Amino acid sequence: MLQKTEPSFRESVDIMFDRAVAVMDLKPGLIKKIKVCNSTYTVRFGVRLRGKIETFTGYRSVHSEHMEPVKGGIRYALSVHQDEVEALAALMTYKCALVEAPFGGSKGGLCIDPRAWDEPELEQITRRFAYELIKRDLINPAQNVPAPDMGTGEREMAWIVDQYSRMNTTDINARACVTGKPLNSGGIHGRIEATGRGVQYALREFFRHPEDVAEAKLSGSLQGKRVVVQGLGNVGSHAARFLATEDGARIVGVIERDGGLWNDKGLDIEAVLDWMKEHDGIKDCPEGRYVADGASLLEAECDILIPAAMEGVIHLGNAARVQAPLIVEAANGPITSGGDEILRQKGAVIIPDMYANAGGVTVSYFEWVKNLSHIRFGRMQRRAEEARTKALVDELERLSADKGLGWTLSPDFKGKYLTGSDELELVRSGLDDTMRTAYQSMREVWRSRPEVTDLRMAAYVVAIDRVAQSYRSKGL
């Protein structure tokens, strides 16, 4: 029976959790321990700006410490509030468990419009917020490791890691206190693109299973599939770019805060992104037909819908009109539990957020490991790989010459084969492997247990079971 009122984001997460544990054999006490948020710290701090003191409110929530450190981004938005941060922290717990990143779940937020402040002012605010968290070990390489989220990026992470280093001058692992940093501050190649790249790899893995594709009333590969992307921020822009240029998908619609853009033949995503940089929006972009009510494109006819911005954009009010047979949750919680129920009854297949947008935390894990090991990936083995492959190629060509076979390897093949893996290639390889393995773990539960009716439920079952196993090993 459909719910009559729209649940909050926090309630949606709890409802989806309850659906999963209903088919699991867990003791009530353990269920409650996994479900509840361990702690939330609220800070209100002042910063002198523009001749007066401005007071800001921030949060850092720790959902589960079954593994440490805990991991989760920091978002800057006026909509930030405690329930949202706690819901996001819970999703981080399950997400990390699903992709087997050795972290508990955490999340942070600052109630601020980052566009209302210039860069020096934003740095002051960020450093003071970081100071308040660092002195309580809510930013620490071994205990709590933030990352970028909506409204933050490399710049803010660089400020935070510098603030931590100033306050912990003898911590050799200081750079591991946050991830998503610029390369010159201890970042890793491929982190900016990671969540969008993860969406691409998630879709590729889904389309490797014809039975699953048929469930979404689709067939074939990603080639030519009509895609609508809501939100061309860091996640949506990269996902759209990769799907269009590398997989042959047709991005027919995009939705931004100032409206939508539609082109049946497919949008030139690079041209759209260039227009947005210059005009701070998509209105009047010549690449497609402008739609003032951008949200209406969520209901447009397409093959794949990718909500990649805010939570709760598909809900009780519009879910029945959504036509996409396959929805990929690139954002956190873009479908409410009420909307989810309507879509499932319609037969839509949803690739859930805790899997689809796990690319960010996966590559953050790689960055954290890199910071702790104090060496970039590939540095020790890349040239040795090249030397071994070159020796093999040289020997094959020598044997060909000796036997009079007259063949040689093409220069293009040799160039690719003889080049050792650099950090970016290794990061992409690790992310691809993670996304494949995580999907297969969900799929196994989905296909083998009749009571598990969809991928979201399967994802929660896999994640909760892994968290439960961790708590049991601690004696709980």
Image: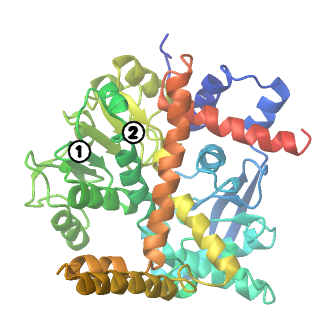
Left or right: residue 435 versus residue 157 is left
Residue positioned 50% across, 21% down in the render: 453
Disc on the earlier residue, 1 or 2: 1
Residue, disc 1: 227
Colouring scheme applied when the structure was drawn: rainbow
Task: Measure how far apart labels 1 and 2 are at the Cα level.
Answer: 17 Å
Is residue 174 in sight in this rendering? yes
Circle 2 sits in a helix, a strand or a loop, which is it? loop
Residue type, numbered disc 2:
Val
x, y percent for residue 464: 68, 36
Residue positioned 65% across, 60% down in the render: 58
Residue, disc 2: 313
x, y percent for residue 362: 55, 59
Residue type, numbered disc 1:
Val
> Which is more toward the observer, 78 or 418?
418
Q: In the image, which disc is placed on residue 294?
A: none
Residue positioned 39% across, 53% down in the render: 201
Residue positioned 36% across, 60% down in the render: 233
> Which is more toward the observer, 63 or 195?
195
Residue 276, by quadrant, is: bottom left
Left or right: residue 421 versus residue 279 is right
Is residue 75 in sight in this rendering? no
The crowding category of the residue bearing disc 2, from other C-alpha atoms within 10 Å (few below 14, some 14 to 19, many at least 20), is many
Quadrant of the image containing the C terminus: top right
Residue 244, by quadrant, is: bottom left
The crowding category of the residue bearing disc 1, from other C-alpha atoms within 10 Å (few below 14, some 14 to 19, many at least 20), is many
